Amino acid sequence: MNVPRPTLTYGGLVQIALFAACALALLVQMAIGFDTTNLASACTVFAASLALLAYLAGTPALHTHPVSSFALLGFGVTTQMGALIGQSAFLVPISENLRQPVGTFLWLAAFLVVAIGMHGFYRWVFAPAGGARPSTLRTWLERVGLYTPPGTGTLWFMGYLGLIAFVIGAGREGVFAKTLQGMAFLTWAPFLIPMYVLQFGQAYCRWHRQAVHLVCFALLVVLLGLAANSRGVMLSGFMTVSLFALLLLLRSREPVRWARVGQTALVLALLGAIAIPVSDLATAMVVARKLRGSVNAVDMVRETWRAFGQPEVLAAERADRAARVRQQYDERYFDNPLLARVVETKFHDNSLTFAATFTDGDRAELARRTLDLFVLTLPQPVINKLGIGLDKRDHQYSTGDLLAHLAHGGPLGGYRTGSMVAHGVALLGPAYLAIYALLCLAAFALLDLLAARRADGSVLVSAVGMLSLWELFLGGITGESVHGWVVWYLRYLPQGIVIFLVVATFCRFNAWLASGLHVRPRATAVSSARPTMRTT
């Protein structure tokens, strides 16, 4: 009897590659840092990463609950797996530049294991695939168009609207500026076009007509990012597209074609080759940042380009950053600024180190100020109307600032990056793991509202889910602080959904007026088209 051989899929290939990278990185760490601290750190990270990869490979989570599963993967990569692979790639011990590496990685591993366990519990008990009927909220979101793939015209309108909002609102204060900043995430909406083409093929649009426009639009965004000295708007777009491509690959059940794998490897090699000049450009933007606010946009671009062309200036900036290591507060873990934006291990290490020194009085003060910061997420006019007696101008600091202040004294301010993990541990100790488990359940349920099951059984990630992937990868189940993370789910996620729906509805209404007929936009036709990549 002939037993059919299992077919290697793209999703399986990516998971094998991640596991192989972790195993190779562990061997590298054993070779370059055979001390107890480094070995304990590397083994802890490898065990936690192995548990995460085994869960994603051994269950259909990525296919049935893609958004929450991807947030889970993001937690593992940005805190542990990325540190192991990234430091090993540069032949640097994983424990280097960390204050308490073993303790930090043990805490992070514990929280990751809790998150994995709660995700499995959530999937099997609260949201089984194909189980209960859609909830009332999900049905309403479907009716208002959250799950309808927007047409190319709508995505282009959103992109330029987001770009205008970014240019006008960047660095400004006030209600109007905050509203504009809340719309800036739409900037990269046009780059969902290739993502929809990958899923629906020519049924969505003719790709060659969009490609040139996308290249020009990307160059415009980069130019405006340089003018505003904002690395975030440049990096977030690139990472959003890259992460969604990764999610598509992880979910793909299409058999591997090695010719395409070779082409992909070539593209990755080219991206690796340009990583060095991109890293230099990021450092040049840090050099030029000293002039932000004192020169116009043209001079800012000129100064950035001047620093980019002077290797000695870039080397001096990196040396200055390295000289700040082991001060009361530093954020240096990777020399590469791009990796430093993706892997947040150092922020957790700083915050956990500060929290370990707290007295009972420090914890009481932290709890009091945390409640104040919760309230201060409300608009100032609302706070004044309620008569609470708090003023945002008197609390211009982050949780990272607060943890450092309580540990070492000194003034508040600077907006240091904190850690939701350390924040909770400082408040409640190990008991915070139980609270975190409940928070994960709520987060998973909200995240999976950003995807919907189609008639053919596949699960399609909404446009809002795609645009939020970078933010969810970094902070879907962790964040800079407990209150900031909760407020993101209660305020900023619904705000993003409302903004998207308002703009999409406006575009559909104008398309209806232009056509003069009561017909649905072209984009809705793809809602019943079958994806070209098998992801179910």
Image: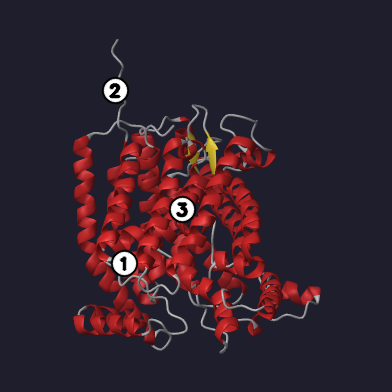
Q: Secondary structure at mark 2?
A: loop
Question: Which numbered disc, 1 or 3, marks the residue closer to the eye?
Answer: 1
Quarter that holds the C terminus: top left
Identify the residue shown where x is 52% and y is 32%: 454
Q: Nearer the viewer, residue 492 or 48?
A: 48
* Residue type, mark 2 in image: Arg
Q: Nearer the viewer, residue 280 or 228?
A: 280
Q: Which percent across, then down, holds residue 473? A: 46, 55
Can residue 83 be seen here? The reply is no
Label 2 Cα neighbours within 10 Å, binned few <14 / some 14-19 / many ≥20? few
Q: Which residue is mark 1?
A: 93
Rendered view: 349 above or below 106: below
* Residue type, mark 1 in image: Pro
Q: Nearer the viewer, residue 412 or 509?
A: 412
Identify the residue shown where x is 48% and y is 30%: 528
Task: Identify the image quadrant of residue 216.
Answer: bottom left
Q: CA distance from mark 2 to mark 1?
A: 41 Å
Question: Which numbered disc, 3 or 2, marks the residue closer to the eye?
Answer: 2
Q: Which residue is mark 2?
A: 5
Task: Identify the image quadrant of residue 492.
Answer: bottom right
Q: Secondary structure at mark 1?
A: loop
- Along the polypeptide, which appears first: circle 3 or circle 2? 2
Q: Which percent across, then down, holds residue 27? A: 27, 55
Mark 2 vs 1: CB contact within 8 A: no
